[in-house]
Image: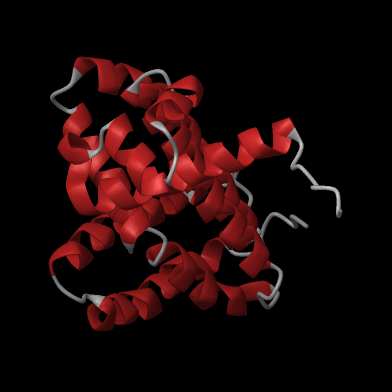
Amino acid sequence: MTPTVREPRQERSRTTRRRLVGAAVDCLAELGWAGTTVGVVAERAGVSRGAAQHHFPTREDLVVATVEFLAGEQIAELRERAETLPRGKSRAEPVARMLLNLYTGPKFRAALHLWVAASGDDALRRALTPLEAKVGREAHRVALDLLDADESRPGVRETVQATLDLARGLGLADLLSDDSKRRERLVRQWAKILEPVVGEGGRS
């Protein structure tokens, strides 16, 4: 008989968490906050309700893990794509495109459902507020790295923050209809605004 190779318990636990968080992203995007219960997520993930509650005792616990997952995925993708960027001022347009497309698709839709729900749910707001602040700081740092910019120069911090705020607004516009053509025109114009801050700090 061939001995059965069992997955180590720690790895099984990580796999279960990943499945639950991935299912939570899908549920939030499709069903919104009201429809995303631990039970619904567990069923979507193919995990027992008991196992789901072992990892995430409350819906807020599950949501915090989901936000961390969404942010981590976005940041990792940006850093990976950054390795292909040209040096100098010519990187302004591809960076503008990357950042202005950051808040689109199912992941942004899932996050948006959470923001809207948190505006009227004290427990959810308390869980999300510090995490969203942390995610915002990380997105700002990544944007600085992508632009190779020096935040100590006047106006650089504000320009980077305006870029991220613009990206969120464009993400909202894209929820109701395909806004890609208009966004591409904005990318080219916004790249001109970003050019003066690119590469001035000598960041590596």
What residue is shown at x 22% (from left), y 28% (from top)?
A: 118
Q: Percent from the top left, x then y, of residue 100?
A: 38, 65
Q: Percent from the top left, x then y, of residue 24?
A: 36, 43
Left or right relative to 142: residue 4: right
Q: Quadrant of residue 185?
A: bottom left
For the residue pair 158 and 32, the one nearer the viewer reads as: 32
Left or right relative to 99: residue 79: right
For the residue pair 79 and 37, the one nearer the viewer reads as: 37
What residue is shown at x 42% (from left), y 46% (from top)?
A: 45
Q: Quadrant of residue 203?
A: bottom right
Q: Is residue 153 above or below residue 177?
A: above
Quadrant where the C terminus sits is bottom right
Left or right relative to 15: residue 27: left
Q: Percent from the top left, x then y, of residue 111?
A: 31, 45
Q: Percent from the top left, x then y, of residue 13?
A: 63, 33
For the residue pair 50 and 97, the one nearer the viewer reads as: 50
Q: Is residue 127 above or below residue 109?
A: above
What residue is shown at x 60% (from left), y 64% (from top)?
A: 198
Q: How many marks?
A: 0
Q: Is residue 123 above or below residue 59?
A: above
